[in-house]
Amino acid sequence: MVNISYFYDAKVTEAIIYEMCEEIVQYESDEFTHNEDNNNMQKMSCPYEYLTDHRIEELLTWEKAYEAAERALERFATGEAHQSERLKVPVGPNFLFTMCGYLKDEEYGGLVSLLFTQFISNKKLEPPLPVVHSDITLMDEKTGVTKVIVPGRELVNWVLPSVSVMATRHLHGKTGEVLAIIGAGNQGRLHAIALHKFFNFSEVRVWNRTASKAEDLVKQLNKAMTSSVFVTANFVEECVNNADVIVTATKASQTLVKYSWIKKGAHINAIGVSVVTTELDDETYRSSTTYTDNKEAAEIELKPIVKLGVKFKEVGDVIVGKIQAPKKSDTTIFQSSGTAIQYCAFARLISDLHKGKQ
């Protein structure tokens, strides 16, 4: 197997590509000689499918999503999963982002490649196109053959909330009465749904900078779940006060949550982080234990947190018993970074469900 680090050396890369091309040419030449009579050659049909967002919604349930998320975290912790460093290619003001991974698991295993693009100018087109586009390609771990391509925008709606649920379960336990959601956008909504379904909170508070968005989300969720547990909060402090679990899911360019507002022993799922600041103040990070799904990636990408002297731990290590779970009195943070392994587990799950194997 080619070591991914080689690709940072242009000369080595060139040699590898040349060698690969030589092998392909030789293989095709041998095949042509072997099948000289073209009448005997079989036409190849497309071996994989591109699943739609709608199909993913039909197939997935939160219960299945929780299982896939937990297995991915477990396998990464036990060394049965590997992934490349993330690569970001600038295209003017836009970019292409990619990461690859391998998960060894009978139920959720495979090879995966994630491609993600962000083109700001798409919204100005006629007709406009989505700014963000992504695809996840799942390949068979035994043959390397593509099995299925899954749209990433829908898949991320399941991956991030499910991983947060598993982090909350293993770092905080299945106790707690109050959930605080900071940010009424897509991830705030999905985290409210996923966490409430698993933990059954007695109250779920929602705050958003534009109050009407929080009010609309609360009405939507109460109606969908035939409940009255979802309520709006007028201020961030009001939202997080005495909350057992907190989710920060905004695009804020300034700090929103102060440590003095947070209940001792609370758990925080921190989804949003910019290159210059965090949604949580410095004291929150300094006075809490911070976990992530991939320590190496977090140390590279979460610079504002690293600068505070934070030492990341991996939630997968808690799941498999490598390190002790935090005490009930410990305030904990799960700083999600997203891994190729998680997308691999979900893509394999979806592929098998689609084919009726699960």
Image (spheres, grey):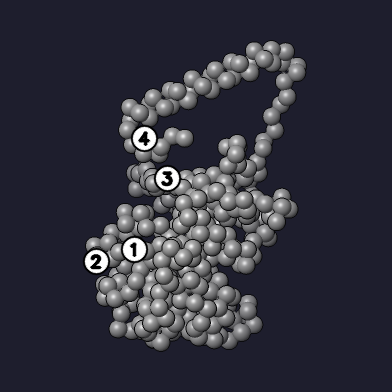
Q: Residue at x 55, y 71 (%)?
A: 194
For marks 2 and 3 on the same chain, the one whose residue lies earlier in the sequence: 3
Which residue is labeled 3 in the image? 84
Nearer to me, 90 or 216: 90
Q: Which residue is mark 4?
A: 6
Residue type, mark 4 in image: Tyr
Specify the amino acid type for callout 1: Phe
For the question of whether residue 77 can be seen, the reply is yes
Of 306 and 150, nearer the camera is 306
Q: Secondary structure at mark 2?
A: loop
Q: CA distance from mark 3 to mark 4?
A: 11 Å
Which callout, 1 or 2, points to the residue nearer the camera?
A: 1
The answer to whether 304 is drawn above or below residue 111 in the figure is: below
Q: Tell me whether the residue at label 2 lies in contact with that at label 3, contact meaning CB atoms closer than 8 angstroms.
A: no
Q: Secondary structure at mark 4?
A: helix
CB within 8 Å, label 4 to label 1: no
Q: Are marks 3 and 1 in contact (CB under 8 Å)?
A: no
- Name the image quarter holding residue 3: top left
Mark 3 vs 1, N-terminal side: 3
Q: State the separation of the CA atoms marked 3 and 1.
A: 19 Å
Give the mark nearer the N terminus: 3 vs 4: 4
Instruction: Give the residue number, with chain letter if any, for mark 2.
Output: 308
How far apart in space, not on screen, are marks 2 and 4 (Cα)?
32 Å
Q: Residue at x 57, y 20 (%)?
A: 27
Q: Is residue 164 visible?
A: no
Mark 2 and mark 4 lie on one chain; the one further toward the N terminus is: 4
User: What is the quadrant of the C terminus in the image?
Assistant: bottom right
Element assignment for label 1: loop
Q: In the figure, is residue 72 to the left or right of 240? A: right
Mark 1 — residue?
Answer: 312
Q: Nearer the viewer, residue 134 or 357?
A: 357
Distance of mark 4 from mark 1, alpha carbons?
27 Å
